[in-house]
Image (tube, grey):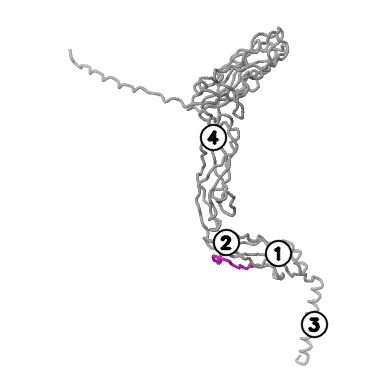
Amino acid sequence: MLKNLGTLLFALFLAVLVWVVAVREQNPPVEGIYKRLIVIEVIPPPAGLTTTDELPDNLQVHINAPQDRWDKLTPAKFKAALDLSNASVGLNEIPIQLVVSDNQVEIEEYEPASVSINLQAEQTLTLPVTVELSEQPALGHISRQPIVTPPTVTVTGPSSIINQVDKAITKISVRRAKEAVERTRSVIIRDRDDLTVSGLEVEPAQVDVIVPIEQRFDYKDVSVSAVVDGPVEPGYWVSNIAVEPATVTIFGDPHVLNALPGFVETAPVHLNQATSDIVQTVPLNLPDGVTVVSSDDQQASNSAQVTVNIEAIEGGKTIQRPVKQQGIDPNYDWSASPDQVDVILSGPIPLLEAITPDEIEVIVNLFELPLGTHKVTPTVFAPDGLQATTILNTVEVTIMSQPTPTTTPTPPPPTPTPKAVGGR
């Protein structure tokens, strides 16, 4: 054994060498770039420090591994970390640590291997939010001071950027608005040159904005009610009356405007035994000193175009009905102007002859409407088989608080007179 020991060891070495060569020929090592990117986990810097530098999100690795390992390799087997926890203020060169869980995979190199990062002290600033309005409200309306919730925001970031901050703003459009505009809007940070500043954390990033819109005292929006006069030819009926514009904005003395209802009438359109549609431009009946104004705040035509549709009778009927409401808050009162509207019914004559006015209802929907004056489109409910429309497109509804009831104190009951017991 001793004489042959060298021979035995040499034979064992040759056997291992042959086995290694055979294995490598069957599963040869392959060197190259792993085509999938490895995500870099960033460990944040110490509290109070931050950076404006852009950090890499992933890296690419060059490896050496057997062929069968390449086929089974996934990004989850790699772990890349950029640890900033021990960095300090100023310029830092931080290496990226990369490890692989498969011991048969060798990491040759990877890119990037390190990151240069400049850390700065983190600062926080509290700013009021200013609302920038764009466009203009509807004619005769003005916007009031916006209400912002919350009124301030907290801005956090590197000191070099915080020093550039001048204001926090949000934008909202009030284009042609007649009622309060409510929106949720993003907050924008601006510098002294009114340029947007980025790279900051804003809390909250969005605010709720309410812009109150009020009508000027010398302006008023009113509906236009068409007036028709005279009968049509026997065998025909008025199937519809349309007016253009349906609403107008008028200008004049506030006392005169306040005395007006929520509508103005046209001069009469005379039917004169008509058998076909009538289209006429007629003046509006306006008080002295009151005019119609256009969207550019200039005087407009004090007239309207009335279209009266006249059809051969299938069956038609006009009924005047009171305006009712649904959905009003129990704590509110309401009123409608006008409080009655004309309803045009059409349908089979037997149904029209049998119908009673109580079967027709004109309803305005007041769900969720706040206190104030609103233009509401009424809905007409009629029995099946009949079609119903109102001559007036909109009704002016005023919602108001109920007056506080006054109570008269109840006097205490009179004290009973004692009765004599046992006397004569």
**In terms of image quadrants, where is residue 351?**
top right
Please name which of the two marks, 4 or 3, marks the residue nearer to the observer.
4
Q: Are marks 1 and 4 in contact (CB under 8 Å)?
A: no
Q: Which residue is mark 1?
A: 60
Inter-mark Cα distance, 4 to 3: 96 Å
The magenta span reads: 85-97
- Residue found at the very far bottom of the displayed protein: 3
Picture coordinates of residue 35, whole percent (x, y)? 74, 62
* Kind of residue indicated by mark 1: Gln
Q: Relative to 4, is 195 above or below?
A: above
Q: Relative to 161, is 311 above or below?
A: above
* Kind of residue indicated by mark 3: Leu
User: On the rendered structure, is 38 left or right of 176?
Assistant: right
Q: Which residue is mark 2?
A: 44
Chain-order first, disc 1 or disc 4: 1
Please name which of the two marks, 3 or 2, marks the residue nearer to the observer.
2
Judge whether residue 93 is colored magenta. yes
169 vs 346, nearest the viewer: 169
* Kind of residue indicated by mark 2: Pro
Inter-mark Cα distance, 3 to 2: 54 Å
Quarter containing the C terminus: top left
